[in-house]
Image (cartoon, coloured by chain):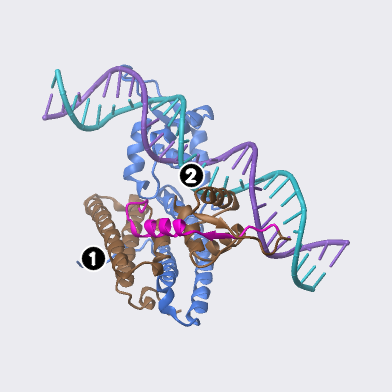
Chain colours: A brown, B blue, C purple, D cyan
Amino acid sequence: MMLVNIILGTLMKKSLTGYEIRKCIESGVGMFYKASYGSIYPILAKLLEQEMVSLEETEDASRNQKKYTITPKGRESFLQWLQTNDSDEKKIEAFVAKVFFFDQLEDADVQIQIEAFQMKIQKYLHELLEKREYFLTLPHQENFYYKLSTLYYGISKLQSLWEWCQVIRNRQPLEQLVRNEK
Amino acid sequence: MMLVNIILGTLMKKSLTGYEIRKCIESGVGMFYKASYGSIYPILAKLLEQEMVSLEETEDASRNQKKYTITPKGRESFLQWLQTNDSDEKKIEAFVAKVFFFDQLEDADVQIQIEAFQMKIQKYLHELLEKREYFLTLPHQENFYYKLSTLYYGISKLQSLWEWCQVIRNRQPLEQLVRNEK
DNA sequence: AGTAGCATGTAATTCGTTACATGATTTC
DNA sequence: GAAATCATGTAACGAATTACATGCTACT
């Protein structure tokens, strides 16, 4: 269902063909979501059926291109998805992909969404930190250095993610998130 | 194919039942890979067929438990996977899951693997940094703050990942990777 | 004239989950 | 004796990819 909403999201600003949608996704949320034609076209057909999108009269009839336009019903559905957090945010990337569209969401809703997500992170982070506590009591850590390293990867990732959330929640300058030397 | 190797990996140290394998994965690479019985049992059946694993004579015949033992052929296959980098490391989590088993790999091979991965990161990072350069030239950045934020998320994530690689490549203390205040 | 890019779509396949079905053993 | 956990397995379903099949258009 994620892709469905990403497609609707790309249509919010302008009408596009399936082909163009793919390029948009690639250059936009492409970092977090790949979309092949094999998934885009069937979804588009289903969205048409559900009247979430409509086909524009092809002014340029020579090319057999189908320009899809989002309908009010589609807009509503998309915004609905954007502001509910019960969806599949177990996957972090899914949440970040959602944030990609947050410019279209009201400030108050953005706050609520991010805060809820931060709480999930915190909870998970806690589990990992406890796991670390446990591992640190074990002897012969040289023997499972790499196993431990993946735990630290997880912790570090969640900490960075939490801070990213913190920055964007307050609309602080993004530059502070990255290292600029080198 | 990833799960196949993770299963073989968990069997490298000791023989386990399908049920136990699941618990092992959960508490081990579980952060990066989920495995349900619906995937584990069929894979186990296939591995048995391919003679990658064998069934131990059930000393405790009363319970119908099947203890699987990895065969030499299975070991070879696993180690082969562990030291080749052509697999699906497009997904970062797949690489980290692999690192989980690096304690079983020779130092020289670990170096090669991580270095190769760091180069992929670097290349991708470069693309994102160029994208950022481009975006920074555009006016009205307030209008796409959140879109930009996901780009910064990507950059920050790759930078952290690169540093994580750097630390583990040199077997440096892992503590430096996380923030310990709070 | 040829290549790259625009454009749409389907069929086979992969990889996995969820839900179902079943039953033994341990623990309280 | 009830509940939790151990233990195995299948069938239905889901979400997406890859490969295939087709053809137009713009550039060089």
Magenta stretch: give its range: A64-89
Q: Nearer the viewer, residue B5 or A99?
A: A99
Q: Earlier in the sequence, mark 1 or mark 2?
A: 2
List the residue tagged with mark 1. B180
**Residue occupying the point 53% across, 70% down:** B127
Callout 1: helix, strand or loop?
loop
Q: Position of residue C20 (x, y in %)?
A: 37, 26
In the image: residue B51, left or right of residue D2: right
**Dot 1 surroundings within 10 Å: few (below 14), some, or many (20 or more)?**
few
Whether C25 is drawn above or below A93: the answer is: above
How many callouts does the rendering have? Answer: 2
For the C terminus of chain B, the image quarter is bottom left
List the residue tagged with mark 2. B2
Whether D28 is drawn above or below C1: the answer is: below
**Residue occupying the point 71% across, 60% down:** A61
The alpha-carbon separation of the residues under discs 1 and 2 comes to 33 Å
Tag 2: amino acid? Met
Q: Chain of mark 2?
A: B
Q: Position of residue A22 (x, y in %)?
A: 57, 59
Q: Nearer the viewer, residue A16 or B46?
A: A16
Q: Chain of mark 1?
A: B
Tag 1: amino acid? Asn
Q: Position of residue B68 (x, y in %)?
A: 41, 29
Q: Nearer the viewer, residue A101 or A180?
A: A101
Whether B69 is drawn above or below A13: the answer is: above
The quadrant where residue B181 appears: bottom left
Q: Are marks 1 and 2 in contact (CB under 8 Å)?
A: no
Instruction: Say if the magenta span includes residue B49.
Output: no
Residue A110 in view: yes
**Dot 2 surroundings within 10 Å: few (below 14), some, or many (20 or more)?**
few
